[in-house]
Amino acid sequence: MQLKATGYNVSILNTFAATMSTYAANTLVPRAGEVARCTLLLKSDRVPLAVSLGTVVTERLIDLLILLTLIGSAFLLEFERIQTFIAQRSAEQTGNESPSILLYLIGAGIIIALVLFLLRGRLLANPRIKALFEKVKQLATELIKAAISIKDLERPLLFIFFTLAIWFCYWLMTYLAFFSIGEMQDINISLAYFGFIVFIMGGIGMAIPSPGGVGSYHGAVIFTFVAFSVAGSPEASKELGQVFAFLMHTSQILMITSVGALGACYLLLVPPKDARISSQETRVQES
């Protein structure tokens, strides 16, 4: 729906294959999937990288907004438990010995940006640098144009419905998986509510940069099981959390990698076509 709003009518099969390829690539290298998805759509449907990347940016911003809203809701319900988990994970990531390398990178980026801004007049006097600047400016313009294309959606209400339905299915996936483990039927808390908290905590774990959420997802889920003492003792709760985290994560990885690999092969082998919507097609749709 987003690509169509930018003027490219890509089939559902191709977009599904590209999306699954995204997930598969992200299990190997975090955030590499977005590049793979845009590259595959360029090959299969001639969608410019700036256009497809713009829709990815919009999609990620929407997902981030929803995730933050859900995390905020979970915070209101389970503030102390979630605060403890985030504090523990922050300590593991940064430590207490020295500032994070991320702070150094941010500082270096700010300094470089200031130097380039102060010397912009001299730099643009060079024809090569000016030509490079114009290309970057054009790419940024196309990226922003694609990112805000959501305002041109043909059926915005349907887009909102599908977006919410996706996140509902994320929770439903966690909730239904509880029934595959017999011990989960005996816990002293509502499975639907606990599934919501596990889903949110797992989302936080998946958001931490790691290949496919390996380790970070498991840690988040196990922490939640122990924090709620779902199996009575901390040891039993930890063991039950390990079983559930392994079951959920492994089944997802197997599905994502297999379907994603098939999707990538399909898009690489299918004859390329130009998915751009012509002016004649636009007039027919409007009529």
Image (cartoon, helix red, strand yellow):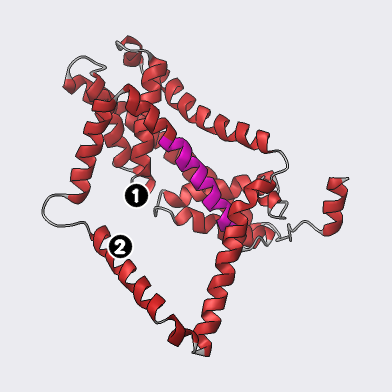
Q: Is residue 67 magenta?
A: yes
Q: Quadrant of the N terminus?
A: top right
Among the two numbered marks 2 and 1 on one chain, the one whose residue lies closer to the N terminus: 2
> Is 23 in front, or is 99?
99
Q: Residue at x 28, y 65 (%)?
A: 107
Position of 5 compared to 253: left or right? right
Q: Is residue 58 above or below residue 73?
A: below
Measured in 3D between alpha carbons, the distance from the residue under mark 2 to the one under mark 1, in whole angstroms, is 17 Å
> Is 210 in front, or is 277?
277
Which residue of the protein is positioned furthest toward the left in this rendering? 97
Residue 276, image quadrant: bottom right
Kindly identify which residue carries mark 1: 209
Q: Is residue 172 above or below residue 287?
A: above
Q: Quadrant of the C terminus?
A: top right
Q: Position of residue 197 (x, y in %)?
A: 36, 25
Q: Amino acid at mark 2?
A: Ile
Q: Position of residue 165 (x, y in %)?
A: 57, 30
Magenta highlight: main SS: helix
Closer mark to the observer between disc 2 and disc 1: 2
Q: Residue at x 54, y 43 (%)?
A: 259
Kindly identify which residue carries mark 2: 106
